[in-house]
Amino acid sequence: MGRRSFVKGAFSPAHGLGLAAFLLSGGLLFFRTETAALPLAMFVLSCLLAPFFPGVGFFLPVISRGRAAGKAAALTFDDGPDPEVIFPLLTLLQRYETPATFFVVGKMVEGNPALLREILSRGHSIGNHSYHHDPFLMLRSRARLTEEITRTQRLLADFGIRARAFRPPVGITNPRLPGVLRGQRLDCVTFSCRAGDFGNRRIGGLAKTVLRRVHPGAIILLHDVSPPGAGTVQAWLQEVEAIILGLGSRGYRIIPLSVLIGRPVMERIPAESSLFTKPP
C-alpha cells in the first residue's frame, strides 16, 4: 500500500474477509456441510500469516512505499540510536547531503539523549519504534502495546517533537494496533526494500542486495546499530555509502520520507507544553 492513513472506525481488509468467510460458511451449511468450516479456517490462517508481510495492511492501513514522481526513494534506520554508529553515520549522510528518517527505540533515546539532539540538529526526521523493541510486542496485551508507544512519545516530547509515524518491531502488526495508533495520531509506516541484514548481524553484500531490490517509491530499511565483531562499523558504513552512491548512479533521488509518502513523519512542538503526562 502507498499513502493511506487512519480513519476512525475504518473497515479493514480483515473485517471484509472475516465477513465474507462467515457468510460463505453459512451458505455452505445448506449445500455442502462438510466444507462449511473451510472459509473460516482460511480466514484464521490469513490472520496468522498476514501480519508477517510488512507491506500488507490487513488489520490497518499501512504505508510501505511512496508515490513521489520519478525515481525516488527514502532511507530509514531502525533500532537506534547507537552511540558507536550514529556520529560516523551522520557524518556520512551530511557528506552526501542525504536525508534520513530514524525510527528510534525509546530505551536507546533515554540512555543517549545527546544522540537524538544530534540527529535533529542535522535536519533528519524521527519516528517511533516502541520503547523496548520487543520482537514479540504484537503478542502482548493492548495495555502493553499502548505503554510501549506512548512512553516513547513522551520521551520525544522532551525534545520538542511528536512522532507522526510508528514502525512496529520487525514490521509485524496485530488487530489491537489500529486503535492504539489512532489514539496517538500515528500512521503505521513499514518498508518495501530491505536487505535481510537481521539487525546488522549480516552486513556482507548489504548494498548489492538493496540496489537489486530498490524500486521507485522504495522505503529502504537499514539499522543504525553496531554490527557484532571488531572493525565492522567501518565495513557497514562502506555498505551504506555504496547504497547512496549506487542509488545516484541509477538515477534515484534520495528524498525525505515525509516527501516520499506525502505525510508528516514528525512535527515540532514546544517541549514545555507537552501533551503527555510524565510517568512517576
Image (spheres, helix red, strand yellow):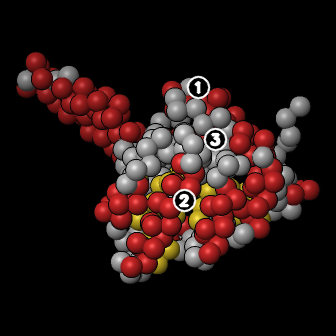
Residue at 65 percent across and 29 percent down: it is 143
Q: Which residue is mark 1?
A: 141
Q: Residues within 10 Å of mark 2 (few under 14, many from 20)?
A: some
Marks 1 and 2: which is nearer the front?
A: 2
Which residue is labeled 2 in the image?
237
Report x, y in % for residue 49: 33, 35
Q: Disc 3, disc 1: CB below 8 Å?
A: no
Q: Secondary structure at mark 3?
A: loop
Q: Which residue is mark 3?
A: 130
Task: Left or right? Give the position of 213 relative to 120.
Answer: left
- Name the amino acid type tagged 3: Ser
Q: Are marks 1 and 2 in contact (CB under 8 Å)?
A: no
Which disc is residue 253 wearing? none
Say which label, 3 or 1, has the lower sequence index. Answer: 3
Residue lying furthest top: 34
The Cα–Cα distance between marks 3 and 2, rounded to whole angstroms, is 25 Å
- Which amino acid type corresponds to the residue marked 1 in the rendered image? Ser
Residue 210: quadrant of the picture: bottom left
Q: Is residue 114 visible?
A: yes
At label 2, the amino acid type is Leu
Q: Nearer the viewer, residue 80 or 25?
A: 80
